[in-house]
Image (cartoon, rainbow, N blue to C red):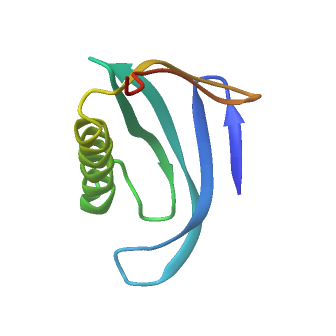
Amino acid sequence: KVEFHEGYIRAFGTMRNPAGDEVEGSMDVTFGVEDDFLMVESIAVDFPGGTLDDPRIVKANRESARGLTESVTESNGEVKFLEADVTDAGLHLKIEVQTRK
């Protein structure tokens, strides 16, 4: 399940706590644009035993940033993110795409 709020998206799901038990909870994620790249960052975690400095959360933030950077790099600069905004109505992206001539 996903909920849209002003400034962030709350995603609900399960993860394993430090003891290895599967627990339910949520994570809040923001979206932004920096230097034409889409930036995604976890800003809150609500899982029993989970924190923002949990190595799995840190790794997920790092991997999503790397994946988004690679997707733009692989487009050879043909895609630029101009704006990213989350409202209670959804995620809104403004992009610029260069088409081949």
Against 26, residue 72 (above or below) is above
Q: Residue at x 53, y 42 (%)?
A: 28
Total marks placed: 0
The picture quadrant where one finds residue 72 is top left
Against 27, residue 17 (above or below) is below
Residue 40 locus on image (x, y percent): 40, 37
Residue 42 locus on image (x, y percent): 41, 42
Q: Residue at x 69, y 36 (%)?
A: 4
Closer to the camera in the image, 88 or 80: 80
The picture quadrant where one finds residue 16 is bottom left
Q: Is residue 59 left or right of residue 12?
A: left
Looking at the figure, which quarter contains the N terminus?
bottom right
Looking at the figure, which quarter contains the C terminus?
top left
Q: Residue at x 37, y 53 (%)?
A: 51
Residue 80 locus on image (x, y percent): 37, 22
Residue 81 locus on image (x, y percent): 41, 22
Q: Residue at x 26, y 17 (%)?
A: 35
Against 82, residue 57 (above or below) is below
Closer to the camera in the image, 50 or 2: 2
